[in-house]
Image: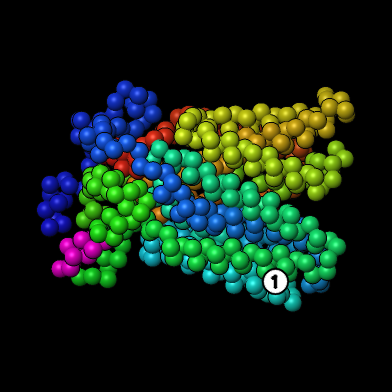
Amino acid sequence: MRGRQRDNNHTPYKRASSRDRLNGQDREDGLGGFGPNETGKGYGNPPWIRSLPHVIVAALSSFLFGYHLGVVNDTLESISLDLNFHGDTLAEGLVVSTCLGGAFIGSTVSGWIADGIGRRRAFQFCAIPLIVGAAMSATANGLGSMLFGRFLVGTGMGVTPPVAALYITEVSPAFVRGTYGSFTQIATCLGLIASFFIGIPAKDVPRWWRTCFWVSTAPAALLALLMEFCAESPHWLLKGYFLSLFSVARLGHSLRGRSAEAEAEFGKLLGGLHVKSSMAEFSKSDRADEVESVKLSELFYGRHFRVVFIGSALLALQQFSGINAVFYFSSTVFKSGGVPSDIANMSVGVVNLTGSIVAMVLMDKLGRKGLLLGSFMGMAFAMALQAVAGSALVPGSLVVYLSVGGVLLFVLSFAMGVGPVPGLLLSEIFPSRIRAKAMAICMAVHWVINFFVGLLFLRLLEKLGAQILYTIFASFCLLGFLFVKKNVVETKGKTLQEIEMALLPA
């Protein structure tokens, strides 16, 4: 049967027929369109409220991601004193960077986990290292146990971003997918702010840092528990990734069983009126061919190389823009202007959250590409302000305003586009067959560049000076603007099947 399908060119990589080709507006965006009768949208948009609880539960993982990123900011000094490595900058750096190393490991295997056990179970699986690692850090009596706990937490942090992006994209109705996709960025901001507030007593209350780590186990356990009541991704169910457990003779039975499960999950997420149309639209891709495993060669130099390259380049440009350098060292800029570090951290957190909320409102109105273009341009302008502030041409009275204003504008611009959009966009443009594994590769690229930017920033700042370094970051932001303008397609309001069929390689 599989051979006949290939002979008849019934593969998921066939080109759309002439009636499915780009209409006038869609040609500008690079996407195909379908009429109401073809997509089964005669009942209008499905109720957005049905999928909202599932999205909120998934966003708990992003809250944990933000919390663990920020939990050591205010507690590192007291941790080093209690564990007897105060003044050892290498050890202090390892407490921060070990988490990034774990995140890289987690991100590389996230696609295989999400495809192997499903999106819902992947959340529950990654909650285990988040709970165990946080508990180990909270009870650590030496540097070794602290580092091992941070590494375990990092592996969970590496798995959650791509899985959250996949799950939210696959369970959200098309007309609110951008809005729901922004929930991950908002939840990350809330996690950062929560870690800041919970860490405030750390300087005055002995061993408070242990409480900070213990607190994170509660939302991790809640994530694992609530996921038990959430819907599984119908897209994953229809891909039939448990095919390896069945013989070829049972293929039809296996697919029929998973098809029934997918219909039930579509009913939970979209309502009964939209189940048949959703199933019919998904069937435009040949499911029997989709169960074949993805070869890495297809992602690195095969027919999917271009779309994986676009995704990896977007996340690379996100990091080369200098965002983590700004986050890590913004307090130094504020301190030079006489602003206390507590107020500085809170200002950056509030601006980041504000920008994320604005992005959520605009995501399904202006579209992904428009937000990315405006975001990169705003970040380039903000970095230019920082570079000008570092020159000898600016009077001393203006340096503080340009520096502080540049930091806040940069964070606001980032949060309105370059922060939330890439994760959502990547999970939209990757075909369902490669979506999880391609996301894993792109996130691995993200963590590698994140690590090296954090590692080399201070040395480059010392060697090159602030003006040259900020100019380099501004140049990367302009490069990001040009890259998005040339390579990124608009996905606003399109179903995942419409996007996939329009971007299929020949």
Quadrant of residue 339 within the rendered picture = top right
Which residue is painted at 50% across and 35% down in the image?
363
Q: Main secondary structure of the magenta part?
A: helix
Which residue is painted at 84% across and 45% down in the image?
340
- Is residue 257 on the magenta stretch? yes
In the picture, the quarter occupied by the N terminus is bottom left
Q: How many marks?
A: 1
- Is residue 500 on the magenta stretch? no
| 165 shown above or below 153 | above
Please name the amino acid that badge 1 sits on: Ala
Residue 152 location (% of width, % of height): 59, 68
In the foreground, 156 or 262: 262
Residue 275 location (% of width, % of height): 28, 49
In the foreground, 289 or 313: 289
Residue 67 location (% of width, % of height): 65, 57
Quadrant of residue 402 within the rendered picture = top right
| 287 shown above or below 488 | below
Taking the image as shown, residue 384 lies to the left or right of residue 286, namely right
For the rendered model, the colour scheme is rainbow
Q: Can residue 155 be seen at all in this image of the molecule?
A: no
Quadrant of residue 222 within the rendered picture = bottom right
In the picture, the quarter occupied by the C terminus is top left
Residue 54 location (% of width, % of height): 45, 54
Taking the image as shown, residue 293 lies to the left or right of residue 327, namely left
Q: Can residue 397 be seen at all in this image of the molecule?
A: yes
Which residue is painted at 30% across and 32% down in the image?
33
Please identify the residue farthest to the bottom as the structure is shown: 141
Stretch of the chain drawn in magenta: 248-258
In the foreground, 146 or 493: 493
Can you identify the residue that label 1 sits on? 138
Which residue is painted at 73% across and 54% down in the image?
196
